[in-house]
Amino acid sequence: MHHHTRTDFESLRDQAVTLRRAGLSRRQIRDRLHVHNNDILNRLLEGEPPPDWTHRPNAKDDVRARARELRGEGMTYDEIQVELGVSKSSISLWVRDMPRPPRRTPEQASAIAKRGWEATLRRRDEERQQTKRAATDEIGTMSDRELFLVGVGLYWSEGSKSKPHSPQERATFVNSDPGMIQVFVAWLSLLGVTPERMQFRVQIHESADIGAAERHWADLVGIDVTVLARTTLKKHNPKTVRKNVGEGYRGCLVVRVLRSADLYRRIEGWWYGIVLGAKRTA
């Protein structure tokens, strides 16, 4: 009878190891083989390293040593998992020969929880930055046509438009985002608008550092500060709670294209061309 059980265990172990090597997590193996006892699961998977994906990318060989160090400092499995971003089953394999830590005082517990939370935030922030960097690389170089289409969309969402009650066919673009201004100016150059047809003017709150703002925008578009049209100041209203104050506040830049009625009509036509193209694609 005993021999029979041994064979069952062996066949279960073969299945568990096969699943582990196929990259399944402990939880997936547990559910698939209906083994809900942790000790048995440990025995079934003994000596099988967890699949790579259960480690965070570029997990170093020193993660194991770090886990043992943290356990020595009295951390629980949960806290080590938060700190290192590895599965609890790995941690268990690495530290289960070590003595269980003594109970902690509330102060110790809250200090450790705070540290764990900071580690989680750091990791999340790193993942965020990595996603953004990868997305930036996906754009790569842009063709003229791509810049052309982006510029039309940019103008139609952010530029001034002619209204039935005030029909002004003039291309004017106002923005506080330096990237938007840079793309818009590059787009105008692509369309053959010469620098002397572009007029730049800063619009800013009167309580801000006006000189710094003028230098910031003039540098961004590559002109001398003296070429800027006269800055428009917004009056200070003590009742308004303004969020955009502080060091980085630079107001807005107004980019006006002179003699632009014809350009304005073309922008409108291009935009409707995009709308029709999108309808056809849909």
Image (tube, rainbow, N blue to C red):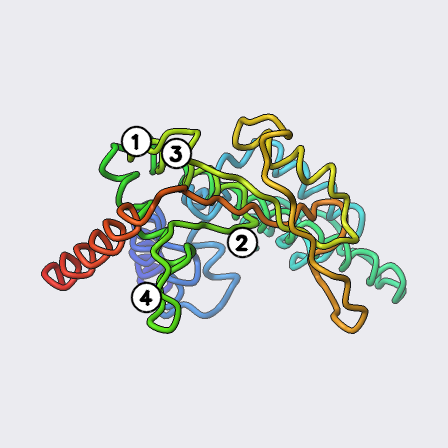
Q: Earlier in the sequence, mark 3 or mark 4?
A: 4
Residue drawn at (68%, 40%) of the image: 213
Of marks 3 and 4, the one in the foreground: 3
In the image, is 26 to the left or to the right of 119? left
Left or right position of 121 against 245: left
How far, Cα to Cα, is label 1 from label 2? 63 Å
Q: Foreground: 264 or 111?
A: 264
Which numbered disc flags the more N-terminal residue, 1 or 3? Answer: 3
Question: Percent position (x, y) of residue 159?
Answer: 41, 54
In the rendered structure, the answer to whether residue 166 lies left or right of residue 266 reads right
Q: Position of residue 278 (x, y in %)?
A: 17, 59
Which one is earlier in the sequence, the residue at label 4 or at label 1?
Answer: 4
Circle nearer the viewer, 4 or 1: 1
Three-letter residue code for mark 2:
Ser
Distance Cα–Cα, label 1 vs label 3: 10 Å
Mark 2, residue position: 89
Provide the secondary structure element on which disc 4 rests.
helix
User: Which amino acid type is marked by label 4?
Assistant: Arg
- Name the residue tied to disc 3: 186
Q: How many angstroms separate mark 4 from mark 1 (CA)?
A: 65 Å
Give, as a three-letter code, the residue at label 1.
Gly
Of the pair 233 and 281, the residue shown nearer to us: 233
* Residue 53 image offset from top left, x and y in percent: 42, 45
Residue at image position (76%, 60%) is 113
